[in-house]
Amino acid sequence: MNTIWIVLPILTLLMFELGLNLKVEDFKLFKERPKPVIAGLVGQIVVLPLLAWLIGNAFGLEPLLLIGFVLIACCPGGSSSNVFSMLARGDVALSVSLTACSSVLTLFTLPVVMDVVTADVGNVVHVHLPVGKLMMQNLVLMFLPIVAGIAVKARWESAAHAMHRVLSKMAFPALILLATVFFVQNRTTIMDNFGVLGASVTALILLAMGVGMAMAWLMRLTGKERRTIVIEIGMQNAAQAIAIAGSPIVFNNEVIAVPAIIYALLMNIILIVYVAIAQRRVTGS
């Protein structure tokens, strides 16, 4: 079974579900509170890919895995970050706004960064990036479903809430299904590289969260905003990375998707621990 035919509908579903939770005003938070929005977007779009490139080279990742490692860092935050922000007593409105803005901005920044990366290391493994096809895929699988979700919410708000309740419950099981099928089909590659990739991914997530915390502290953001920035920078859309890696019109290489699978696993474990610590600090228990 080609996992791409599982990834593509799951990604489309997740993006539509994200759109159902958005409204046009979510894109305008920058005008009201520019500092936390700037901190979150700079952390995700600039700092995270740079950290991934440095860490990937420091750990000596082979070219295909390095491409996949930077790819996951270039992806936007997922809708799950909104739930984690709520659980961590964070700023949910900020989280939603950052997810919305990063999902649009990375439509343009991801192809640029990945074009540079593949131009540098892709020749070694005969991999190149068809930038136009990548942008077309992101437009169809991400932008249009988000816009459709926003339109449905604007026109039929009660129906949008009902669909959101159903789809939000399906999102996590769908990702688990995807991860399971992918692991079964690529278990040898995953197990052979789990040590170095596990260490690389853990370093990336922890350093990214640390940078987010430092940026929030320097900008004198509130506790709620700081917790949200940390979560947003530490939580990326693994489904999108897998879709790009496995897509027949982009990379068409499941090895490139391996870092995203390991990232998805460790990301949830690390952020669950962070949320538990944040909850204890907020409640003072």
Image: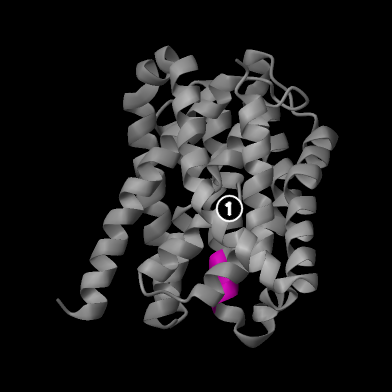
> Can residue 212 be seen from the camera position used here?
no
Q: How is the image coloured?
A: one colour
Name the residue furthest left: 285
Residue drawn at (71%, 28%) of the image = 119
Instruction: Give the structural element (helix, strand or loop) at label 1.
Output: helix
Left or right: residue 53 compared with residue 200: right
Splitting the image into 4 quarters, where does residue 255 fall? top right
Dominant SS type (magenta) = helix
Could you say where residue 10 lies in the image, as x and y percent from the top left? 62, 39
Is residue 251 positioned above or below 226 on the image? above
> Can residue 103 be seen from the camera position used here?
yes
Is the residue marked by circle 1 packed among few (<14), some (14-19), or many (20+) residues within 10 Å? some
Magenta stretch, residue numbers = 36-40
Quickly name the residue at label 1.
Answer: 167
Comparing 161 with 190, the one in front is: 161
Could you say where residue 216 lies in the image, as x and y percent from the top left? 44, 73
Residue drawn at (75%, 52%) of the image = 145
Left or right: residue 13 compared with residue 66: right
Residue drawn at (53%, 69%) of the image = 95
Could you say where residue 223 lies in the image, as x and y percent from the top left? 37, 80
